[in-house]
Image (cartoon, grey):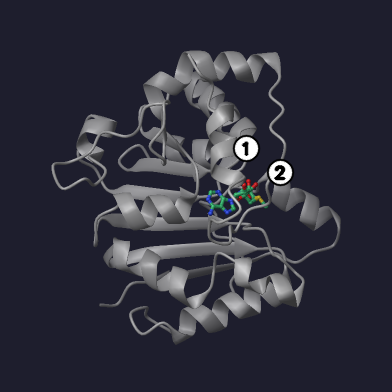
Amino acid sequence: MTLPSDAFRHVAARPHEPLRTFHPRRTVLGRDREDALERLWPRWGFSVHDDELGSAPLTPAGLLDTPTLFGRSAPLVLEIGSGMGETTAAMAAADPGRDYLAVEAHLPGIANLLLLVERAGLANVRVAHGDALDLVRRLLPADGLDAVHVFFPDPWPKARHHKRRIIQPSHVALLRSRLRVGGTLHCATDWLEYAESMRDVLDADPGLAGPVELVARPAHRPVTKFEQRGIDLGHEVHDLVVRRAR
Ligand SMILES: C[S@@+](CC[C@H](N)C(=O)[O-])C[C@H]1O[C@@H](n2cnc3c(N)ncnc32)[C@H](O)[C@@H]1O
């Protein structure tokens, strides 16, 4: 089997591709994670991009066939940038009535999440490798998601990099179009300036119900390792939860 690390290079390295919201990183997989990918990827993983790894099951219209992917029809949560996957695994375990689709560009995180899913015996998690924006644009139908989670996205603090932020007007309009009316977009960040920018972007979206506020972490969102690092550095964490209004 060709390991998905090949696909990661494919995702990250093309110079003519659109600006990515993630940092290209060298993929170093330890033995456990290589093994996890070999064993578990064929069961629970798919690539966002057409390649030799095998892609997702599709409907005749060419969209993601989630009932086939999960083996049932249940409300669907999309987690963008799941990192090492601890939050996805914990939230999915506490919420067995919904299905969780995690999408992550960084392969070691995917392998780690697959291991967590196996250890916890979770039936309601699937993992996509690649750019979440490509997944949402090409494969997800309108009005299909119950929730979108964007936890601690790369803050791109320099002004000249703000165009790489995932929470910006065009991306938010795209995500909102894939939510059902009443579905939620939940963002969290430990970067105050990004939190304020998120609030302004979400407030300005005509299809989301405002006013949007910066709130404390809701109890159902566990603290991630990444978040803990920020807290240890003295960063304040803000959550923003907003519903699709129409
Ligand atoms: C700062 S980390 C946070 C990870 C995790 N949510 C947490 O709280 O620990 C941001 C993650 O988002 C991923 N990411 C950023 N943009 C992405 C995109 N467009 N598609 C897929 N993954 C993305 C990065 O690879 C990175 O792993």
Q: Is residue 102 above or below residue 180?
A: above
Disc 2 residue: CB within 8 Å of ligand 1: yes
Other-residue count near label 2 (Cα within 10 Å), few / some / many at <14 / 14–19 / ≥20? some
Residue 64 visible, this orientation: yes
Disc 1 residue: CB within 8 Å of ligand 1: yes
CA separation, marks 2 and 1? 9 Å
Q: Residue furthest front?
A: 16
Q: Residue furthest right?
A: 233
Mark 2 or 1: the one toward you: 1
Disc count in the image?
2
Q: What amino acid is at disc 2?
A: Lys
Quadrant of the image for the C terminus? bottom left
Q: Earlier in the sequence, mark 2 or mark 1?
A: 1
Spot occupied by residue 143 in the image (x, y as percentages of width and height): 24, 62
Q: Quadrant of residue 239?
A: bottom right
The residue that appears at 53% across and 74% down in the rendered structure is 168
Spot occupied by residue 85 in the image (x, y as percentages of width and height): 57, 38
Whether the residues at callouts 2 and 1 have beta carbons within 8 Å, the answer is: yes
Residue at image mark 1: 84
Residue 225's tag is: 2
The residue that appears at 31% across and 61% down in the rendered structure is 178
